[in-house]
Image (tube, helix red, strand yellow):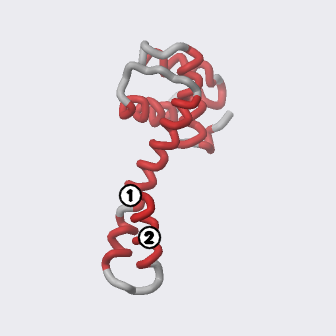
C-alpha cells in the first residue's frame, strides 16, 4: 500500500508543477528504494531457506557487509565471503551463508558479481 501511494504521489507531481505532494514523494525515494531493496533481499534469503536466529535487520546488515568487500573476496573467492558471514552469524550453515552472499550481490552490489 505504501508503495502504491508513493508511486501515485510521485507520478502526480512529476512534471506537472502541482505542488508539494510530488516533491515530498520524490524526496523520500532513497528511503523507499532502500526499503524495497531490503525487502527483495529478505525475500530471496527466505526463498533459499535461510534460517537465521537473527532479526531481519541483522540479516540486512550482513548483506550490506558482504558488499563492503574490503578484501576483494567476492570476485576472488566467494566461499571466503560466506565464511565471513558465518563468523558474524553462527546460526547460519555454510550453505545458508552462501545464499546470503548471493542475495546480497544480486540486490545490493550486482557490479561485484564474480
Name the residue nearer the viewer: 114 or 54: 54
Quadrant holding the N terminus: bottom left
Where, quadrant-wise, is the C terminus in this rendering?
A: top right
In this picture, residue 108 sits left or right of residue 8: right
Q: Nearer the viewer, residue 52 or 27?
A: 52
| Residue 60 drawn at (x, y percent) | 42, 35
Where is residue 74 drawn, in percent x and y?
A: 60, 30
| SS under mark 2 | helix
Specify the quadrant of the image occupied by residue 44.
Answer: top right
Measured as percent of width and height from the top left, residue 16 is found at: 44, 86
Q: Residue 40 at x, y = what percent?
A: 51, 43
Q: Earlier in the sequence, mark 1 or mark 2?
A: 1
| Residue that protrudes farthest toward the bottom in the picture | 17
- The correct choice, above or below, for 79 with respect to 103 in the image is above
The residue wearing badge 1 is 2
Kindly identify which residue carries mark 2. 8
Label 1's element? helix
**Residue 29, quarter of the rendered image:** bottom left
Residue at (38% x, 54% y) in the render: 31
Amino acid at each position: 500500500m505504501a508503495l502504491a501511494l508513493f508511486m501515485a504521489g510521485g507520478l502526480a507531481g512529476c512534471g506537472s508543477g502541482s505542488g508539494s505532494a510530488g516533491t515530498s514523494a520524490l524526496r523520500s525515494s532513497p528511503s523507499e528504494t532502500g526499503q524495497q531493496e531490503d525487502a527483495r533481499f529478505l525475500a530471496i534469503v527466505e526463498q533459499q531457506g535461510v534460517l537465521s536466529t537473527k532479526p531481519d535487520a541483522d540479516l540486512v546488515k550482513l548483506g550490506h557487509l558482504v558488499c563492503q568487500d574490503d578484501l576483494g573476496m567476492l570476485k576472488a573467492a566467494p566461499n571466503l565471503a560466506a565464511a565471513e558471514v558465518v563468523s558474524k552469524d553462527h546460526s547460519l550453515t555454510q550453505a545458508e551463508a552462501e545464499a546470503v552472499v548471493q542475495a546480497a550481490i544480486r540486490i545490493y552490489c550486482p557490479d561485484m558479481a564474480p
